[in-house]
Amino acid sequence: MTSGKPAPIILVPGFWLGAWAWDEVADILRNDGHDVTALTLPGLSSAGDDPTKVSLDDHVQAIADAVRAKGSRVVLAVHSGAGAPGYAASDRVAELIAAMIYVDTGPAKGALDPDWAAPTRPFPSLEDLSESENLDGLSQGQLQTFQERALPEPGAVIREAATLTNDARLDVPTIAICTSFSSDDYKDAIKQGYSFVAGFPELHDVTWIDLPTSHWPMWSRPADLARILGDVASQHGAD
């Protein structure tokens, strides 16, 4: 239900990133009057962290705790690799989520890579990154900052799977913002059985939005991404 007060927004970055990745989007939203919280997940706050001791459940719990801390229903936006713990968090606190937003990712089921054996996944070289991900619209300065600030992703987050038990998550309104691949590409990935999008078919209310740009739209199209996030928060505002 729409109201005069938008729902609070929680922003969760993907692999290798901290809350800083959302700074530009968060500033735009706050200037528009939104209540915004950006998260840094366990193991990714500083180079002194030990990511080898961080589990997938630690990430799930951190997201769920942030949702509970707002004291009202929220819009939860998760990016890239955070789709897995984000979907698991929606299983734990479904009643507190007004809407889920998947930013170039999906509601993962099962492990992202059950065969991942290394203790961490280090940030790749920019050359390797360009071969595996869409970098459209990213400046050299943004890529350099990414390289300088990125931290190794905990390996357990990649190889572990969450247990989903609460069917209430299926009724949470869901928005998929497709950036590096189109919504049609995502739907093809669902048909092919990729784990990172495996939860989409079971959800009851999914809206697809195409926003062609890089895999990191918070940097390549921050104003457009902020507008979408803000619109969802306004649409699902608290009574």
Image (spheres, grey):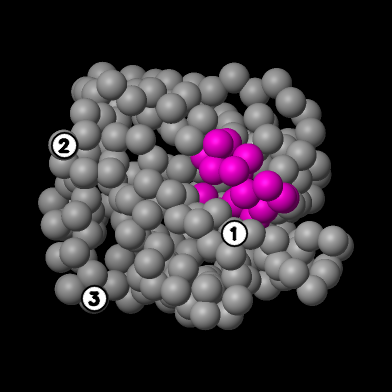
Query: In screen coordinates, is 123 left or right of 170?
Result: left
User: Which residue in the structure is indicated by mark 2?
Assistant: 48
Per the model, the C-alpha gap separating discs 1 and 2 is 29 Å
Are the residues at dot 1 and dot 3 in contact (C-beta closer than 8 Å)? no
- Amino acid beneath label 3: Ser
Query: Which numbered mark, 2 or 3, is in the foreground of this view?
Result: 2
How far, Cα to Cα, is label 1 from label 3? 27 Å
Q: Sequence order check: which comes first, mark 1 or mark 2?
A: 1
Whether residue 129 is visible to the viewer of this picture, yes or no, is yes
Inspect the magenta stretch and tell me whether residue 68 lies in it: yes
Query: Dot 2, how many residues are within 10 Å of its Cα: few (below 14), some (14-19), or many (20+)?
Result: few
Q: Position of residue 74 (x, y in %)?
A: 67, 53
Q: Where in the figure is residue 210, as x and y percent of width and height?
A: 58, 68
- The answer to whether residue 231 is left or right of residue 10 is right
Q: Quadrant of residue 136?
A: bottom left
Asked whether residue 93 is drawn in magenta, I would say no
| Disc assigned to residue 139 | 3
| Secondary structure type for disc 1 | strand
State which tag comes first along the sequence, 2 or 3: 2
User: Label 1 sits on what residue type?
Assistant: Ile
From the image, tell me which residue sits under label 1.
Answer: 9
Depth check: 9 or 195 in front? Answer: 9
Residue shown at 43% from the left, 27% from the top: 58
- Compared with 1, 115 (above or below) is above
On the image, the x and y values in percent for residue 34 come to: 60, 70
Task: Report helix, strand or loop for mark 3.
Answer: loop
| Above or below: residue 90 compared with residue 220 | above
Query: Which numbered disc covers residue 152?
Result: none
Residue 192, image x and y in percent? 56, 38
Q: Amino acid at mark 2?
A: Gly
Tags 1 and 2 in contact by the CB under 8 Å rule?
A: no
